């Protein structure tokens, strides 16, 4: 309360203390682990409808570069040792490769969708070189997209599954290590909605054919028409794609000038008693059975669709109906309530 100089000294001292305290708080925040990342409601709905979803920026630049450094070093040392579909097999348990899943938000995102999982190991380094999948140089073969498959079936070039065996899992998770912004760049290619079509096919036909014949026992296109056309998945370096096991997929030809870099991880929930060594048929007869984070979305989606139809009818009769934004807000609220109840 005294003279001006005393008041000024006190104010300066207080400001310095506040600044020091702010820096201390910032230091604590920097040391604190980031909160687990979760799928947005839009991503969760896309995953349920299509059987896959691309999550932007799931892996940071430094982690991607560490994996690329390991891969390119391996290519330089083993340039003549390249198997179709799998490069650098010695890197399957390399810390830089596994870190794409284990030390990024990918693990949180996957567990948010499926629940508790077994330890993830044995990553697949999947490179698609210019000209792969092409003929006469860089020509795209007609009907190339008819050669889809499911993983875990006996097939030429698959040393992991023998004839008579079927090794399904819960989710295929890919991390892009290069930008894939256009079609025919070696894209992971999927048939949106095929997971439900194949669920119904296996419910009717069982698993005898795929056990006996491997991928050759899968239905032909005319036997199981998929609801939507093939989609070549696009994304940027660091994006993750989460795919339901039962989605029909393949790899697009690469007519570009660049190598497509990607690493895949095959995820089993705790419901699989023997990962990579057994068949869990109930998870193929009910494709969302082991996805705990997806429970209840089908009923909510049907309710939303019914609401939209009723709204369309109301608009035709005159009074303004609830807006699409309001409906989506209601759906998100219902999803949050469902998650809390679960």
Image (cartoon, rainbow, N blue to C red):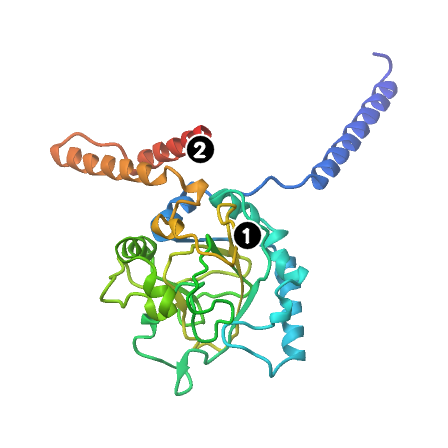
For label 2, the crowd category at 10 Å Cα-Cα, with few meaning under 14, some 14 to 19 and many 20 or more, is some
Let me know if residue 148 appears in the view.
no
Residue in the picture at 41% in, 75% down:
253
For label 1, the crowd category at 10 Å Cα-Cα, with few meaning under 14, some 14 to 19 and many 20 or more, is many
Residue where numbered disc 2 is placed: 339
Against 38, residue 200 (above or below) is below
Which residue reaches farthest top? 1
User: The C terminus appears in which quarter of the rendering?
Assistant: top left
Residue where numbered disc 1 is placed: 58
Relative depth, front residue between 97 and 332: 97
Residue in the picture at 40% in, 81% down:
134
- In the rendered structure, find residue 142 and report the number of the disc placed on it: none
Against 71, residue 52 (above or below) is above
Let me know if residue 154 appears in the view.
yes
- Regarding mark 1 in the picture, which secondary structure is present there? loop
- Regarding mark 2 in the picture, which secondary structure is present there? helix
254 left or right, relative to 175: left
Percent across and percent down for residue 267 are: 51, 53
Spatial CA distance of label 1 from label 2 is 23 Å
Percent across and percent down for residue 148 are: 36, 68
Percent across and percent down for residue 55 are: 48, 52
First in sequence: mark 1 or mark 2? 1
Q: Which of the two discs, 1 and 2, sits closer to the camera?
A: 2
């Amino acid at each position: 309360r005294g003279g001006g100089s005393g008041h000024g000294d006190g104010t300066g001292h207080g400001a310095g203390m506040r600044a020091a305290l702010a820096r201390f708080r910032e230091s604590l925040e920097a040391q604190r682990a980031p909160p687990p990342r979760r799928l947005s409601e839009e991503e969760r709905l896309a995953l349920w409808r299509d059987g896959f979803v691309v999550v932007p920026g799931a892996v940071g630049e430094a982690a991607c570069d560490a994996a690329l450094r390991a891969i390119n070093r391996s290519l330089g040392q083993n340039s003549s040792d390249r198997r179709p579909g799998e490069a650098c097999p010695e890197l399957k348990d390399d810390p830089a490769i596994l870190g794409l899943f284990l030390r990024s938000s990918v693990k949180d995102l996957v567990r948010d969708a499926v629940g508790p999982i077994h330890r993830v190991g044995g990553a697949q380094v999947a490179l698609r070189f210019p000209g792969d999948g092409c003929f006469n140089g860089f020509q795209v073969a007609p009907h190339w997209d008819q050669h889809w498959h499911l993983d875990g079936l006996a097939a030429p070039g698959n040393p992991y599954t023998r004839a008579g065996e079927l090794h399904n899992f819960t989710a295929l998770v890919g991390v892009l290590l290069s930008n894939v912004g256009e079609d025919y760049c070696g894209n992971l290619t999927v048939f949106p909605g095929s997971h439900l079509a194949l669920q119904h096919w296996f419910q009717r036909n069982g698993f005898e054919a795929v056990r006996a014949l491997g991928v050759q026992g899968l239905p032909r296109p005319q036997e199981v028409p998929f609801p939507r056309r093939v989609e070549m998945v696009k994304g940027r370096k660091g994006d993750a794609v989460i795919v339901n096991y039962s989605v029909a997929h393949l790899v697009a030809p690469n007519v570009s000038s660049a190598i497509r870099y990607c690493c895949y991880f095959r995820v089993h929930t705790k419901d699989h008693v023997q990962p990579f060594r057994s068949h869990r048929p109930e998870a193929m007869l009910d494709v969302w059975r082991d996805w705990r984070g997806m429970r209840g979305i089908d009923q909510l989606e049907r309710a939303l669709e019914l609401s939209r139809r009723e709204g369309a009818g109301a608009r035709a009769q005159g009074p303004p109906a609830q807006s699409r934004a309001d409906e989506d807000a209601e759906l998100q609220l219902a999803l949050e309530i469902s998650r809390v109840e679960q």
